[in-house]
Amino acid sequence: KAGVTQTPRYLIKTRGQQVTLSCSPISGHRSVSWYQQTPGQGLQFLFEYFSETQRNKGNFPGRFSGRQFSNSRSEMNVSTLELGDSALYLCASSHGSGLYGYTFGSGTRLTVV
Amino acid sequence: GENVEQHPSTLSVQEGDSAVIKCTYSDSASNYFPWYKQELGKRPQLIIDIRSNVGEKKDQRIAVTLNKTAKHFSLHITETQPEDSAVYFCAASSENTGNQFYFGTGTSLTVIP
């Protein structure tokens, strides 16, 4: 059973640019959640998509957006990048009920210079 | 919304000793409590979970206890080994929150050989 695949693994972008990250969940999982992880800030919830609909959203500015496709693959977009957006972005795949744990991807390490 | 607090933030133990990490939650509707282990440079991985209809669950050297009345749950690691060194995160969720998990801020565990 394939795990959660995130691409790319590493990205270096310049301030003001935009970036798109991709996540392919475990086959059969309909929920994809995105988290930002920075040293000292733990896991900050960005948003969750379930059956192509955003079901939950965290407290991030509108520069952070996402979508989910009919095959459950999800993309996350960050526009007008800021230095503070440098972080590890983790995608988490699950059934979607809130009663089963996530399987995390390996993450995309984004560096904004 | 739900608020999960985790203590301590850092913990050092001698190899072979026990380690205990505690979390409290605020929403009495939360009924699923997973624990994740994140080794340096790797993804968080689910190591054990507990549902609200159970007071304790064990898996080899790790166990989790839940006190619904007091709204707290704990991770216990016995006979610690150097490979237990990692950051541990607790989390809480319920059907009411869809699939949004509320994470604690993490505990950095160091096992000294």
Image: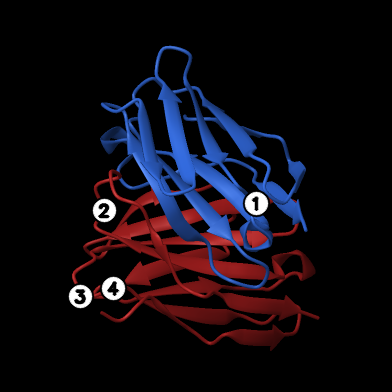
Q: Are marks 1 and 4 in contact (CB under 8 Å)?
A: no
Tell me, yes or no, whether dots 2 and 4 are on the same chain: yes
Q: x and y percent of residue B68 in the render?
A: 39, 18
Q: Which chain is blue?
A: B
> Mark 2 = which residue?
A96
Q: Are marks 2 and 4 in contact (CB under 8 Å)?
A: no
Task: Identify the residue under disc 4.
Answer: A26
The reply to whether callout 1 and callout 2 are in contact (CB within 8 Å) is: no
Residue type at numbered disc 3: Ser
Q: How many marks?
A: 4
Task: Give the letter of the chain under mark 3.
Answer: A
Instruction: Say yes or no: labels 1 and 4 on the same chain.
Output: yes
Q: Nearer the viewer, residue A107 or B96?
A: A107
Q: Which residue is mark 3?
A: A70
The location of residue A3, given as percent across then percent down, is 35, 77
Q: The residue marked by circle 1 belongs to what chain? A: A
What residue sits 57% from the left and 43% below the top? B78
Q: Which mark is residue A42?
A: 1
| Circle 3 residues within 10 Å: few <14, some 14–19, many ≥20 | few
Q: Chain of mark 2?
A: A
Mark 2 → mark 4, Cα distance in angstroms: 12 Å
